[in-house]
Image (tube, grey):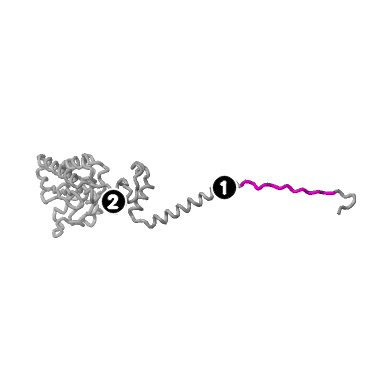
Amino acid sequence: MSVKGQPVIIIKKKKHAHAHHGGAWKVAYADFVTAMMAFFMVLWLVGQNKSVKSAVGGYFRDPVVFDMGGGLGVLPGGNAMETPSTVTVDPESQRQALEAAVNHIRDTINHAPDLEKLKNQIEFSVTAEGLRINLLENDKSSFFDSGSAIPLGETEHILGVIAKELGGLSQDVVVEGHTDSRPYAPSNRSSNWELSVDRANSARRVMERSGLRAAQVISVRGHADRQLRVPEQPLDARNRRVSIVVKNPVTTLADARAHP
């Protein structure tokens, strides 16, 4: 009931249609599904064996390698293309290459007049580690002056012959230095440790100048008198030696797999 003379106010409410929500919920849902997929993939991977984990890890480290395989799988039974850890080595061809290198080294040294007195001090042997070439000193002739790491002229010639042959091989090389147990004077700041390392490094430098590839040498070791050749005679000159080890490819692959 209105009061006489007071204007009447009429309020009309407009009905609004519900606004369109858009596609934001679809993006959120897609993110949720992706997260759940990643979660279950992690759970699946945790339960797999070591070879599957290695294959998946290899894909994410270098997917191009797997793309080159024409869609081959990376899991067991999927005809996965071989990775470096599964590369096989032909032992027979490797053995033949080493034998040829040894024969060439021997022939060259035997026909060099200036190496006549040292040729019998070069020893070749095959071990589980690979081909080992020892330059053994004796009481009458040496490869270095006493207490020195500077190779004699004949020593450089021999190392050059060895380097020329080994440089044509694919195998890695390790150079080792060994001494006898003769101690240094107490006042001398050097020891057999320094001498063994310095001699091995000197041999490496000569060989790299003479044909051995720099990348071929993977290690230079100094053993001092800890690996005596004649343990019952620690002062024997034959304990003083430089060893050049041509690594066995099979052993190298096994080491790489054990220490990825």
Label 1 is placed on what type of residue?
Ala
Q: Is residue 88 magenta?
A: no
> Could you say which is closer to the camera, residue 19 or residue 241?
19
Image quadrant containing the N terminus: bottom right
Q: Which residue is mark 2?
A: 256
In the picture of the structure, the residue carrying the numbered disc 1 is 24
Crowd band around label 2 with a 10 angstrom C-alpha radius: few (<14), some (14–19), many (20+): few
Relative vertical location of residue 209 with respect to residue 186 in this rendering, above or below: above
Q: Position of residue 216 (x, y in %)?
A: 25, 44
Disc 1 versus disc 2: nearer the observer: 1
Task: Name the N-terminal-most of marks 1 and 2.
Answer: 1
List x then y, in percent, for residue 241: 17, 50
Q: Is residue 27 visible?
A: yes
Does the magenta stretch mainly form a helix, a strand or a loop? loop
Single out the residue that lies furthest toward the bottom. Answer: 232
Residue 187, labelled with which disc? none
| 19 drawn magenta | yes
The span picked out in magenta is 8-20
Q: In the image as oriented, which residue stretches furthest toward the right?
A: 4
Q: Indicate the position of residue 191 as horizontal and vertical percent values.
A: 23, 54
Q: Residue at x 14, y 53 (%)?
A: 238
Query: Does residue 206 appear anywhere in the picture?
Result: no
Q: In the image shown, does 181 or 71 lie closer to the viewer?
A: 71
For label 2, the SS is: helix
Residue 36 appears left or right of 164: right
Q: Residues within 10 Å of mark 1 (few under 14, many from 20)?
A: few
